[in-house]
Amino acid sequence: PEMIFIFIALMRTLPYHMGSQDLRDYIGSQGTSHKADQQLLINEVNPNSPGLGTKEYIELYHTNSGRVSLDGYVMVLYNGNGNRAYKVLNLAGFMTNDKGFFLIGSSSVVPKPTIIPSNTIQDGPDGIALYYGGGPYYEGMKVTNVGLVDAIVHKTKKNDKADVLSSVLTPGKEAFLEDAFFRINNKSIERCLGPDLQWIFQMAKPSPGKENFCSSFWMFNLPSVVLNEVRTKASPDDFEFIELRGLPSTSLNGLVLVLMERATDMVYYSMDVTGKTSSNGLFLIGPAGSNIPVNQPFPVTSRHSLLRKGPAAVALYSGDSSDFQPGTPLMDKHLIDALVYGNRAPMDQELLDSLTPGKIAFPQSSISLPGGSSISRCDCCQLVRDSAAYVGSSPTPGQSNDCPTRNFHQKITYCLKVTECSLWVPDSQVSYDIRFSLAGNIENICSCGVSMGYIKDSSIFCQGAGLVFKALLIAKSSSQLQQLHSAFHTHVGREETIIIAGRSAVVDQDCLHPLEEAIPLIGPTDTGSVSPGSSPEPTLLISEVNSNNPGTKEDAEYIEFIHTGKAAATKLDDYWLVFYNGRDNRAYHVLNLTGHQTSAGGYFLVGSAGMSPTPGITIPVKFIQNGPDGVAIYKKKKAKYRKGMKVTNLDLVDAVVYTARFDDSVDDLLNILTPGEKVLQESHRFQGGKTDESLSRCRSFQPRSQKSFELSSITPLQDNTCNSTTLPPDDNLMVGELQFLDMLGNFLINELNTVNGSEMGAFIELKVPPRANMNKYVVVLYDGTDQTAYAVIYLQGLSSADGYFVIGSPQGFTPGKQMLIPDQLLLEPLREGPGAVALYYGGLEDFSVGIRVTKEKLLDAVVYAFKN
């Protein structure tokens, strides 16, 4: 199956039927009339069923959830090649069923739909549009949005273009990627509720004529309403308010808003909440008479600020306000959500223990922000009763909160000297406490309103006697990110003694760099497992992993090891090889290497019977899973490793965690086997899928280092073919569009030689910033005769100190008398032309051999011809 992208736009409504009553309530809350063009919606699409296309369908849903005439509706299917209608279906005379559904589909769809021939719905790039009135609509007509009710634009290949269809039918909407690997069999695109409580489409098991399978885990566990924003008065003229957030048009009857203060640790005010959330899921409670409209006013009897300055708390309960009279003690019964806030000084624990056990109060900042300062939820909506979900921001009553974003991020490593690190980890509470402490220390330096909500994706592990904390620092802008990052380094440079949850630690700036540098000949210590950065000692390391062969035979899989002493006949007694499944984090195969020894060069091979050279240990066909999985080496005398055991790092020597797809999650394996590292991908797109490939150790003999590997041609029992021999640096400060714009003009094709037989040899020279990490850049070679890519070069390694990066012949080239070796090999000869060389920002998932010419993420290009 091929990838499908979906562009989606909804006209004046946000439809869905989590329960049909919810959607009816939502439509009613918009003040809409019962015009047909506002209530019939595209609810599910299956445009690309396996086989002969006999199970494709389009499901419509009417918000009345019952039998409704479809007179006046027309469905038009558009071809993206020419942007004209290829099928027009007049729905006059038809009706939705008793549940509000109407199916248009192939003969094999159950329940029986209004029949269309098999393969009627094209794979794309195409569009499906639903109209009411207007017209006439006819086959061959140009695309139009006159009378448009709902529309989907879809395509089967990422680089197919459907710009005209999307600009007319779904303007301003981003692509939805149909995951070809979601289900081996049939799948569909279904309307569901997103994690930010907004309507989205997602992949699911087909459900024609039924409620959609919206199976995201958070949908079954989250409260229907949470605290979204709280603003206390800093001056008499400030607009204080409390904002709730939930599903659109959710009834709030039966909820109680309760205010508490530290002075008494008791309730000082409560009120029953009445009404419904708005169309965007918000509900604003504030003083009446303000120029900002509220959904429910504070009582007119309140002459002073209703919200006390901290330490204090706001809580949301189910029940009745009579249960929470002033003077009532704290309780957690029927508690839905709570926010405890105050200054950074230590505070009485009773508020915290009762309302947010194990958590920390939100530290209100004294900094001045435009329009004042609010406490705004920026993690919706899995975190409840936790101050880590909030940040300080400018007030946004009735609007989306002003939050930091991952578009501006920086990976950080924070090292601490502690006593007996093993007593600190693994402990999620320690990671939480470090986040709070670090945010406070950064805030003390920059006074920029930073809190725990700016520090994401944290992990901790022991390195020698020290503790290493890795996380993602996020911000609202690139300038704020630079401010936060500068404050972080200032704090680290001070090497202060800090207190974390009552325990002392010393900030250590010297341990920040060893993880990023190539350390040769690293092996295990005498006790415990090997940590990145341990002292050098010859040992057995994973050198190459080939888990996925081209085709279906899978008869040339292997794992190659190298003993860093590089001596032949080194005994492998007491070494164990364990294969882990990333789905359940348990061992699915275990091999004892005792009795075996290395061959010439220190290599040892475990592989399939069909491969050459002959492996030291032969394994059955399809023995090594494609991923998401892990491979680990342990060394221990009298060990009892077994199939089904849980993943462990005890006595671990080396490990590799890999996958075949970018969207697989292997966080547990990474955290235990290779902490702080990213998963590796063995991609079938390597060199256009023409040859087999492996994950090859190239950049260091550092154990448990994913960054030491790169995708390369297979070399069993030989030296690996490597493009780079240095470890890459951390990611740049910015990502996303701003970073891309900054690249323009700084990443250029500087020189090009297309003559493969010349003395110099063909090469491509790039001019980029000095010592730039090239791992996020791609060079694509296009053939001018068919406008498609014949080679894709995924760049790896660093540019030179002068800012040059050369892709050239394996033999090197000789300008003048100096022999130069290219930074990366040019394995595909440059064609004489007409052709083009293009430099892009992207990765394996963005470009592949056979794609048509694209300008997306293009940085620079040269178009050339050999003749006129």
Image (cartoon, grey):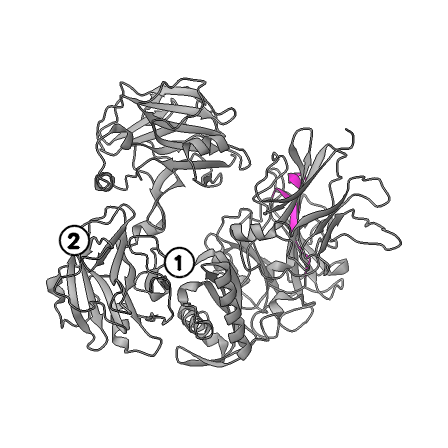
Name the residue type under label 1: Cys
From this view, report whether residue 741 is shown above or below residue 300.
above
Q: Residues within 10 Å of mark 2 (few under 14, many from 20)?
A: some
Q: Locate residue 114: give its quadrant.
A: top left
**Image x and y of residue 631, in percent:** 57, 56
Which residue: 61% across, 75% down? Answer: 526
From this view, report whether residue 609 is shown above or below residue 523.
above
Sequence-wise, the earlier of marks 2 and 1 is 2
Please state if 336 lies on the left or on the right of 733 as rendered.
left
SS of the residue under disc 1? loop
Seen as rendered, the residue at the extreme right is 817
Which residue: 66% across, 29% down? Answer: 786
Q: Which range of residues does the magenta coloring cover?
A: 684-699
The residue that disc 1 covers is 403
Name the residue type under label 2: Thr
Work out which quarter of the rendered image holds the C terminus and state it.
top right
**Image x and y of residue 736, in percent:** 52, 51
SS of the residue under disc 2? loop
Q: Locate residue 133: give its quadrant.
A: top left
**Image x and y of residue 146, in percent:** 36, 26
From this view, report whether residue 46 is shown above or below residue 447.
above
Please state if 423 lies on the left or on the right of 303 as rendered.
right
The residue that disc 2 covers is 274
Residue sitting nearer the eye, 536 or 343: 343
Q: Is residue 698 magenta?
A: yes
Residue 574 visible in image: no
